[in-house]
Image (cartoon, rainbow, N blue to C red):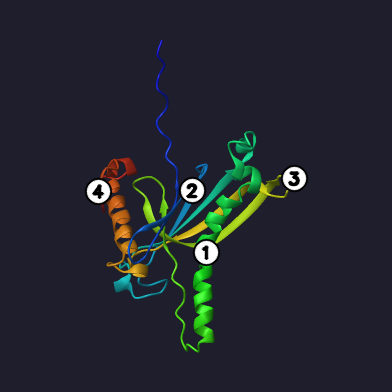
Amino acid sequence: MSSFPGSPRLLKGGLVLVDPSAGAVQRIIALQYNPDSLSRTLQVQSVTGEGGDRSEALRLKGPPVETIKVEAEIDATDQLEFPDQNPTATDVGVQPQLAALETIVYPTSAQLQQNNQLAHAGTLEIAPMLSPLILFIWSKTRVIPVRLTDFSITEEAFDPRLNPIRAKVSLGMRVLNVNDLGFNNKGGSLFMAYQQQKERLATISPAGSLSVLGIGGIP
């Protein structure tokens, strides 16, 4: 007797690093386990604050400043049960997964060495080092350009050689919008697609009625 083929494929959330100039994908980091929750905060960008010009009260300067917070778990316990099949986990635990995330916020060693050589050569002005464009992927409707704002790691268990085998990673991200990147930037176009997707989803939200609010019309 044949059985049901199974539940739908579980998609993973993660980060994608993209070359900011060419748009080529440099690295894909899929989260081992999807976080149970994701928190988002939107700070409205109004023209005026309290006590401002009344004629500007309804005007917006641009998209809200959106921040995202996720906590992800990384665990090599199951892999350590089969050391012959998972030599990396046996040798260094979850350090490769942590390093893939950590190096996002580091300039590359090549960039550091190049700037050091420029400094020794007497270059008066050295441009800050360019990092990849980071995309936070949370389903096909959320492909979001972000900047990491805070990043913490809690290593919770270690093997006999002090390799971490279980860790929690907390990621704070700020969404980069067209005010940050411009319209002609790859990240700017991705933000516009993200906002337009929100607008499409809003149109299919069930419409309310004034009667539900207890009124028959706007006074």
Picture layout, residue 91 above or below residue 194: above
Please name the residue that numbered disc 1 is placed on: 105
Q: Mark 4 or mark 1, which is nearer to you?
A: 1
Alpha carbons under labels 2 and 4: distance apart: 37 Å
| Sequence-earlier tag: 3 or 4 | 3
For the point 36% across and 52% down, the residue is: 143
User: Hey, what amino acid is under mark 1?
Assistant: Val
Q: Is residue 39 left or right of residue 155?
A: left
Please name the residue that numbered disc 4 is placed on: 217
Q: Mark 2 or mark 4, which is nearer to you?
A: 2
Alpha carbons under labels 4 and 1: distance apart: 53 Å
Proximity of marks 3 and 4: CB atoms separated by less than 8 Å: no
Q: Residues within 10 Å of mark 1 (few under 14, many from 20)?
A: some
Mark 1 element type: helix
User: Hey, what amino acid is under mark 4?
Assistant: Gly
Q: Residues within 10 Å of mark 2 (few under 14, many from 20)?
A: few
**Residue lying at the far front of the rendered structure:** 84
Front-lying residue, 111 or 42 = 111
Mark 4 element type: loop
Where residue 122 appears, x then y in whole percent?
50, 89
Mark 2 element type: strand
Q: Quadrant of the C terminus?
A: bottom left
| Sequence-earlier tag: 2 or 3 | 2
**Residue lying at the far right of the rendered structure:** 160
Mark 3 element type: loop
